[in-house]
Image (cartoon, rainbow, N blue to C red):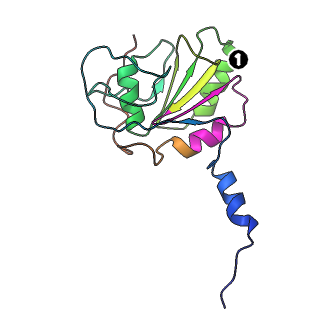
Amino acid sequence: MKRLLPLALPLLLAACSGASLEGVQTFEYKGGDHRTGSLVYAETPPVGGAHNAMWQDCGVYDQPLYNEYAVHSLEHGAVWVTYRPDLPASEVTALKELLDGRSYTLLSPHAGLSSPIVMSAWNAQLAVDSASDERLTPFLDKYEQGATAPERGAACSGGYGGTQ
């Protein structure tokens, strides 16, 4: 006998998966555009587009990263969590704890952010005011190694491990 799911169940599953995560901006960049030198991006921090042929090693950094390397990591399925350089230490610690155990993430300060914390993935971005914002984990769950990354699963280590 065939069992029918209640009509509300698909809606509940979509909400739990972060399918309609409030405040996420989406974009439409294609992958694979490798260039050299310093590049100009429309978003701060960038969420896609041309980037260096070398990717940024995933991890926690206390200095700003080069956009061109970090964008390549986004193409590989990483989520880049950036914060204003003057963010309180307690907030930075909370972000480190949030990312603990995740292998496809970057954390670094970034000047010129529109909000204290900005999470970026390939073609998606979420700006928040606090590390306690309940949308951070669903964003990570959806976009870390998510379907929007053109080269999902490519390396997030063995690339560039420095900072600016």
Q: Is residue 82 magenta?
A: no
How many neighbours does mark 1 have within 10 angstroms: few (below 14), some (14-19), or many (20 or more)? few
Most foreground residue, 33 or 3: 33
Residue 84, image x and y in percent?
A: 60, 13
- Quadrant hosting residue 78: top left
Count numbered badges in the picture.
1
Q: Is residue 2 above or below residue 81?
A: below
Vertical comparison of 89 with 69: above or below: above
- Choose top left, top right, bottom left or bottom right for residue 141: top right
- Which quadrant holds the C terminus? top left
Identify the residue position indicated by label 1 in the image. Answer: 90
Q: Secondary structure at mark 1?
A: helix
- The residue at 45%/36% (across/down) is 122
| Relative image position of residue 103 (x, y in whole percent) | 47, 37
Of 50 and 141, the residue lying toward us: 50
- Label 1 amino acid? Ser
Spot the residue most to the top. Answer: 86
- Write the residue at 52% across / 42% down: 143
First to last magenta residue range = 121-141
Locate residue 41 relative to residue 22 in the image: left or right: left
The image quadrant where one finds the N terminus is: bottom right
Q: Is residue 134 magenta?
A: yes
Pick the front one: 163 or 48: 48
Residue plotted at (48% across, 46% down)? 146
Residue 161, position as x, y percentages in the image = 36, 21
